[in-house]
Amino acid sequence: MANPTVPEILTGLVRRAIAAAGLGNGDDPIDPVVASNKPQFGDYQSNHAFRVGKANGLNPRAAGQKIHDHLPEHPAIAKTAVAGPGFINFFIDDDWLCGHIIEMVGDEHLNLPQSGAGKTLVIDYSSPNIAKRMHIGHMRSTIIGNTMLRLHQAAGWNTVADNHIGDWGTPIGKIIVAWKGWRDEDNLAADPIGELERLYVSFGQKAENDDTLIEQAREETARLQAGDPENRALWQRFLEISGIERDDIYNRIGATFDVTLGESFYNDMLAGVVEDLLKHDVATISDGAVIVQFPEDAQPKMLRETTVVIRKADGAALYATTDLATLEYRMKEYAPDRILYLTGREQQLHFQQFFAAWNQLRAARGVEDTASPELIHLWFGMLKVDGAIPSTRRGGTIRLAELLDKAVEEARKVVEDASPELSGEEKDHVASVVGVNTIRYFDLSQNPQSTVNFEWARALSLQGNTAPYMMYAVARIRSIQRKAGVEAALSNLAITNPKERALLIQLLKLPDAITAALETQRPNLLCEYLYEVAGMLNSFYAVSRVLGSDEQASRLAFIEAVARVLEYGLDLLGIRTLERM
Ligand code: ARG
């Protein structure tokens, strides 16, 4: 069990004070105590007097005073005050602060509340379509998705990471036609995924001048789906080839999955879903197709007067049908409390439609179906890479593997400049880690919903909210510790100047920053928090010497605590740190 966080402790005290002051029974909703934004208002503050005052017909200042006067004693608190129109300010006790930080950085989860204990998350991320190389369009889903997975795991969730690959339907039929018609065996041997991609692209080009090709592709798809052994074997081969290139990318980026259940897996369940929707009057038949229509007052707004096709008149199922079947399967298999889907913004309507259709179906099924998971579509904006990578721009897309190679190459130049003393081998190693981290961190440090312009100079800068800067902050601590030649004993932690105190208060906020990133699905909040930690550490170095100072023992403990917070936070972001760089 993690220790309570400081806001939890202080909110608990306010709750007790309210009961003691006769302003409520202690079970009422309470505005949690939050960090103050100005030092003169203490380290933390409660704004709850406004709410309690209203409920009790008191002005907030009087309510604040009453709460304040009934606050129980607690070792965490050095001083309290009522300020302004009714804020209650808390000043944290220095000794208690040090003790709490020592416990926190010794805790497996750094006191992160285990809010996910006993709960299950299914996360559907990355999910590319097979037989193509992974390109930049898959990057954000893979990186942000993997970080959301790590954040949930840290908060105690059971997790199932599922790669819902697109491995079914007419694209496969097209590749089968192209494969049978004009595959290049030499190219296939040399670059299997490249040859599949070439076949797919060339099919599109040839189909422009040959109408029969699309019909052939449809037939091949139908034969595949009917179980034709030849097409099944080809399809297996495409799956295998695609899997190899995917795994390579995932290893480099640090993404992991528990299952890879592609669209094909749900093929046999599609008919049942359509029947169910019809039986419960959620779907209707229109011109031979099965559709779900959303009325003009539907919520959310984007659904209004839209229609989603569940089965085409020719009997073909669609993307939404598969997603409904997938959801049914996940409910039965994992009984999740939350399902998180990561895709680009252009799929918003699709997700809102199938969520709404499924909710209608659940409502129509009635009471026995009570489990109600949270369905969250975490969409993200486009990522553009600037300064291009000339050799990798083909058809306007940038291949992920080549972007990663390029990142390592660029990182090598930075390392050459910044750390000339390292051996060539060390430089290569540092560059390989920095390169991938740079891509990952740059993506994560942006609001997921923003359109992002990736710029090499900005992403690799040693100043600013970047992977190299964050990694350097950790490596510098490790370097100071090596030079000290003694183990840092955390028990020596003490406050020797205001910069240290401010940073220790900042360290207290780690659990809050993680929880905020988790619950708002914005890993960039954690990046910002860590960036602030690193900046405050630099302000500390500017006024305090560690090595050879009278305070060396406590300052070694101090930087050790900072290192642990940075490393823990960066690990949740999937950023590997180095002891030396
Ligand atoms: N394969 C889809 C694509 O590349 C993404 C799938 C996302 N997951 C889902 N359950 N629809 O756009």
Image (tube, rainbow, N blue to C red):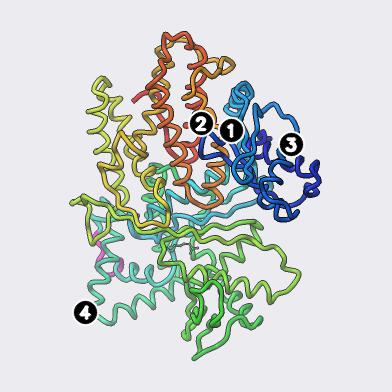
* Mark earlier in primary sequence (1, 4): 1
- Split into quadrants, the picture shows ligand 1 in the one at bottom left
Looking at the picture, which amino acid does disc 2 mark? Val
Q: CA distance from mark 4 to mark 2?
A: 61 Å
Marks 1 and 2 close (CB-CB < 8 Å):
yes
Could you say where residue 26 lies in the image, as x and y percent from the top left?
Answer: 78, 47
First in sequence: mark 3 or mark 1?
3
How packed is label 1: few (under 14 Cα within 10 Å), some, or many (20 or more)? Answer: many
Q: Is residue 342 above or below residue 72?
A: below
Q: What residue did someone put label 2 on? A: 565
At horizontal 47% and vertical 32% (from top left) the residue drawn is: 566
**Residue placed most toward the observer, 219 or 109:** 109
For marks 4 and 3 on the same chain, the one whose residue lies earlier in the sequence: 3
Label 3 sits on residue: 69
First of labels 1, 2 by sequence position: 1
Callout 1: SS: loop
Helix, strand or loop under label 2: helix
Check residue 110 in the rendering and tell me which mark sits there, or answer none.
1
Q: Residue furthest left?
A: 390
Residue at the extreme bottom: 287
